[in-house]
Amino acid sequence: MCNFDDTKYQSDKERKRGTRAASIGIYCAHEAINDSKINLAQFDKSRMGIYVGITEHGGAETLDELLNIKDYDYNPRYVSHLLNPRAISSNPAGEIALNLGITGPHYTLGAACAAGNVGIIHGAQMLMLGEVDVALCGGVSESIRGFLIYASFKNERALAFHSEPHKACRPFDKDRNGVVVAEGGCLFTLQRLEDALSGNAAIYGELAGYAINTDATSRVVPDWQRQSQCISKALHMAAIQPHDINIINSHATSTSIGDKMEGMAIHSVFGDDGNVHITNTKSYIGHTMGAAGALELAGELPSFSDGLVHHTLNLDNLDEECLIKNIVRNKPIKSDNIRYILNNSFGMLGINSAVIIKKYE
């Protein structure tokens, strides 16, 4: 569960009228703006854009209404007039815009578990097109309220179980048995470099390359060849070679087939390159769905300054079928001159995304 002060930037009335996902997004947006040192009172808000990736939205709100009117023999008269603005797919980004008074474009981007990366990519594209000067971008998730999501994962045999809950998420381990569903949010303030420098912003890295593609083969089973292609396209855009990457934050969700497919994709591009260290953040926080790409990337960025590569938890017996080499396990390692981080995020219906961040020098 994501713990935060949900009335720090919202009144009680606003919070009750809105949604959990939007509340997480509003909190993240304010924190991102504060950290970037942007003075909203002096900034043209029509030149700001909001790009929020999500997995699903509206299901929890709809289920709440059905449960509420059950006591009234399902009489539609008792459905809340707030359901429509709560359940529409544009809600999280729209509520952020309302809260901050931002009048530029706002998009809520449905991209399954690739959504956090997709939010970043879309924000960057709009900056390059000159449509906006600031992009609030990333992803949010309110998965803990989605009872039906849990049930569906369980019936797919993709929901993790372990007698010791903190060991349930175990990417690339032989005994992995499914996803640990979590929630969270992460938004970045993205600007063109010259604007960030003129505003004395804290620069955590430069977006060097990215790619999005589609498997077009299955609703739930990944295609390692398309994932490999996605990674290669991101490397090509960044104009670097595989051995230039220092850290790969793997998407690995701890599902049997998913981890294996990603391992094959990584191996097909990087082979046994000893310069590339592989990590996994879900082993710490679970799978935050729409927030995963952005939130996991945020966890890797400190490596640029402290030179530490965090280890993957619960990796007791590495599954050799995953073909994963040089994965960091047992304890963090120190690595000199970390310059490039690759962040993988893949999702159902075959959507793949890869983002490459370069150290700002």
Image: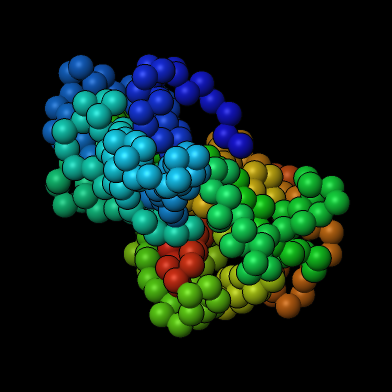
Where residue 270 sits, quadrant-wise, is bottom right
Q: Is any atom of residue 233 visible in this view?
A: no
Near-viewer residue (35 or 180) = 180
315 vs 226: above or below: above
214 displayed left or right of 93: right
Q: Position of residue 3 (x, y in %)?
A: 58, 29
Residue at point 81% right, 65% down? 175
212 vs 26: above or below: below
Residue at point 37% right, 64% down? 211
Where residue 217 sits, quadrant-wise, is bottom left
Q: Position of residue 237 (x, y in %)?
A: 34, 64
Near-viewer residue (177 or 234) = 177
36 vs 80: above or below: above
Numbered disc total = 0
Q: Position of residue 263 (x, y in %)?
A: 63, 71
Residue at point 24% right, 43% down? 106
